[in-house]
Amino acid sequence: MAKQLVVRLRADGTVDAETIGMHGPECLDHIEALEALLDAETVSSRFTEEYTSTAVHGATRLEAEQTDGAP
């Protein structure tokens, strides 16, 4: 399975991110990079059963505050 980082931007300003096809803590590196890009922090996170198997599928919810006045 190809590695994917699926990002959903919600109308209320929250961001949901889900990693697919990543092994172990590799998914956390991608979530950390997304947090840095969005200047956001993870407010909830969970690992699925696949976290310790050969296929990783994790989900994270991020919230970002907009500080530059742009829409």
Image (spheres, rainbow, N blue to C red):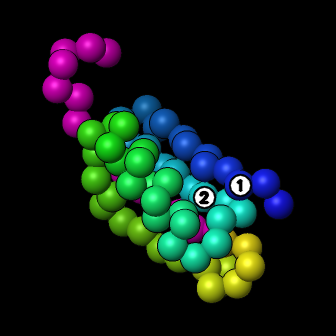
* Left or right, residue 34 beside residue 66: right
The quadrant of the rendering that contains the C terminus is: top left
Identity of the residue drawn at 23% across and 29% down: 66
Identity of the residue drawn at 26% across and 14% down: 70
* Left or right, residue 42 beside residue 58: left
**Do the numbered discs 2 and 1 sit on residues whose CB atoms are within 8 Å?**
yes
Dot 1: few (<14), some (14–19), or many (≥20) neighbours within 10 Å? some
The quadrant of the rendering that contains the N terminus is: bottom right
* Picture quadrant of residue 2: bottom right
66 over 50 or under it: above or below:
above
The residue furthest right is: 1
* Picture quadrant of residue 56: bottom right
Question: Tag on residue 3?
Answer: 1
Query: For mark 2, what is the residue?
Result: 19
Q: Is residue 71 visible?
A: yes
Q: Under tag 2, what secondary structure?
A: strand
* Residue 61 lies in the magenta stretch: yes
| Residue 49 picture location, percent across and down | 64, 84
Q: Under tag 1, what secondary structure?
A: loop
| Residue 24 picture location, percent across and down | 58, 76
* Picture quadrant of residue 15: top left
Dot 2: few (<14), some (14–19), or many (≥20) neighbours within 10 Å? many
Amino acid at circle 1: Lys
| Residue 21 picture location, percent across and down | 72, 63
Task: Tell which circle, 2 or 1, labels the residue nearer the N-terminal end.
Answer: 1
The magenta region covers: 57-71
